[in-house]
Amino acid sequence: MRQVSGRPVVLVTGVGRRVGIGAAIAEQLARDGWDVATCHWAPYDDRMPWGRQEDDPDLIQELLRAAGAESTAVPADLSRPEAPAEVFDAVEAALGPVTGLVVAHCESVDSSILDTSVDSFDRHVAVNARATWLLVAELARRFPAQAVGRGRIVAITSDHVVHNLPYGASKGAMDRIVLAAARELEHLRLTANVVNPGPVDTGWMDEALLREVAGRNPRGRAGRPQDTADLVSFLLSERGGWVNGQLLHSDGGWRS
């Protein structure tokens, strides 16, 4: 199997909305010289306050191609255990073997210890933790021998768990899976890191919350998707190759 353009191929999950972190990462990596596959699941947006952005997946594809990348978009319900392998099949058929993986998708529905349902908890674990494990495993199983030493995995996490129990708990599990890959997949000489961007303005914060977040951050503002994209760009670059097995906070000092 050969790469379509000769550029390396990265799969970025969670790229359904133009204002999202995943879209910013995908666009930056296209500018960096990657061919970019994306996946998204519009029915998830249907359940969220912002709703489905019907044209955004196609618009994102246009922007990736304008940046010089070959690209493909794969709709995928990552709550299904079969979905990660299906995504890799589709990406390989369109672009060639994948050597970079950025996990930016999530299931995130607010609930607390006393009111989280078992179904909600299980869905969060399936989408945020199990799907990440299966995506990482597919990358490893299919990794091309000629690319050993150049592979990259980055996952986007959060430590927000108070009144957001299933999201935070499943993201914590995801962290451990990705960090384990730095050791368990050492035969591939790839890097595996996790990025916690803190609160990022992707349309889920109202004006009052934006002001509160800005007031609590030493930088005087909420995070922006490009802030995260810049760090992921570095981690996927040759210059970022010595950073491995790390959970990095890139939040303007939010946690300080």
Image (tube, rainbow, N blue to C red):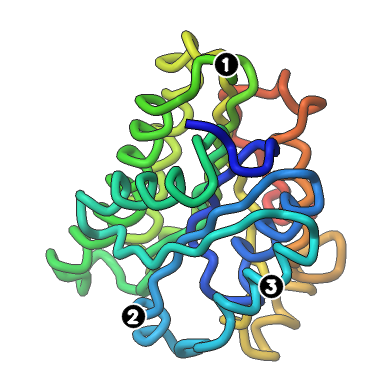
**Residue behind mark 3:** 62
What kind of residue is marked 1? Gln
**Number of other residues with Cα within 10 Å of mark 3, as a class: few under 14, some 14 to 19, many 20 or more:** few
Q: Residue 51's x, y, as percent?
A: 46, 90
| Left or right for 29, reference 15 | right
What kind of residue is marked 3? Glu
**Number of other residues with Cα within 10 Å of mark 2, as a class: few under 14, some 14 to 19, many 20 or more:** few
Q: Residue 184's x, y, as percent?
A: 40, 15
**Residue behind mark 1:** 146
Q: Quadrant of residue 138?
A: top left
Mark 1 to mark 2 CA distance (whole Å): 38 Å
Q: Earlier in the sequence, mark 2 or mark 3?
A: 2
Q: Quadrant of residue 137?
A: top left
Toward the top, the furthest residue is: 187
Mark 3 to mark 1 CA distance (whole Å): 30 Å
The count of marks equals 3
Vertically, is 36 above or below 16? above
Report the mark closest to the observer, 1 or 2.
Answer: 1
**Residue behind mark 2:** 43
182 or 210: which is nearer to us?
A: 182
| Left or right for 21, reference 104 | right
